[in-house]
Image: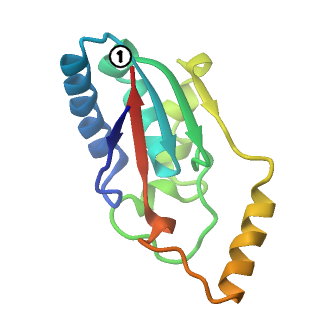
Amino acid sequence: MYGFNYPWGRKVEKNAERLRRFVEKVCEDSGREHVTLVAHSLGGLVVLEYMHTSAGAKRVRKCVTIASPHAGVRWRGPIFGPVGSQVRQGCEFLVDPRRPAHRGAHAERLFDARQPGAPAAHERARQARRDGLRRRGGSAIWRSCSTGG
């Protein structure tokens, strides 16, 4: 299993290119032809963008996204960096029919694993805040994409 971190404030296309280089290195080092990708949050958009390139179509066997904003986010406050214009509901990046999210290719390899128990998790987080506990490391803005062959 490999971990991939990226500058999440940058445009999705730029990070998809970084992911391409990373996957090529993983395949070279491991001797594997394909990878399975697991992505959280914004990482799901990065992976989807990569999967719709010729390199991604060749390398990605399966992809699981967890809580990725495929339909955009409703947050109206500021979103750091150029990626902010790409993740809001209704933004051009997400609704453009030429974008990967709307092309439908590779859909059989993509699975969005949203948890049905998410409201309970949110309630536990609210309770922890009331009790004075805080998550460390800015996990609300942490993005991750892991590959494994």
Viewer-closest of 3 and 143: 3
Return the x and y of residue 95 as percentages of the image width and height.
56, 43
As displayed, is residue 117 above or below residue 125?
Answer: above
- Asked if residue 12 can be seen in this view, the reply is yes
Check the image and tell me how it is coloured: rainbow
The answer to whether 82 appears left or right of 129 in the picture is left
The answer to whether 55 appears left or right of 70 in the picture is left
As displayed, is residue 145 above or below residue 130?
Answer: above
Viewer-closest of 2 and 84: 2
Residue located 69% across and 73% down the image = 125
Report how many numbered discs are placed on residues in the image: 1
The residue type indicated by label 1 comes to Arg
Viewer-closest of 78 and 44: 44
Q: Identify the image quadrant of residue 13.
A: top left
Where does the N terminus fall, quadrant-wise?
top left
The answer to whether 23 appears left or right of 74 in the picture is left
Return the x and y of residue 113 as percentages of the image width and height.
66, 38
Q: Identify the image quadrant of residue 109.
A: top right
Residue located 19% across and 17% down the image = 28
Q: Identify the image quadrant of residue 51.
A: top left
Kindly state the secondary structure of the residue where label 1 is placed: helix
As displayed, is residue 30 above or below residue 130?
Answer: above
- Asked if residue 99 can be seen in this view, the reply is no
Residue located 38% across and 70% down the image = 80
As displayed, is residue 105 above or below residue 47?
Answer: above
Residue located 79% across and 61% down the image = 119
Judging by the rendered image, the residue that carries numbered circle 1 is: 59
Return the x and y of residue 99 as percentages of the image width and height.
47, 34
Q: Residues within 10 Å of mark 1 (few under 14, many from 20)?
A: many
Where does the C terminus fall, quadrant-wise?
top left
Viewer-closest of 137 and 106: 137
Return the x and y of residue 66 as percentages of the image width and height.
59, 43
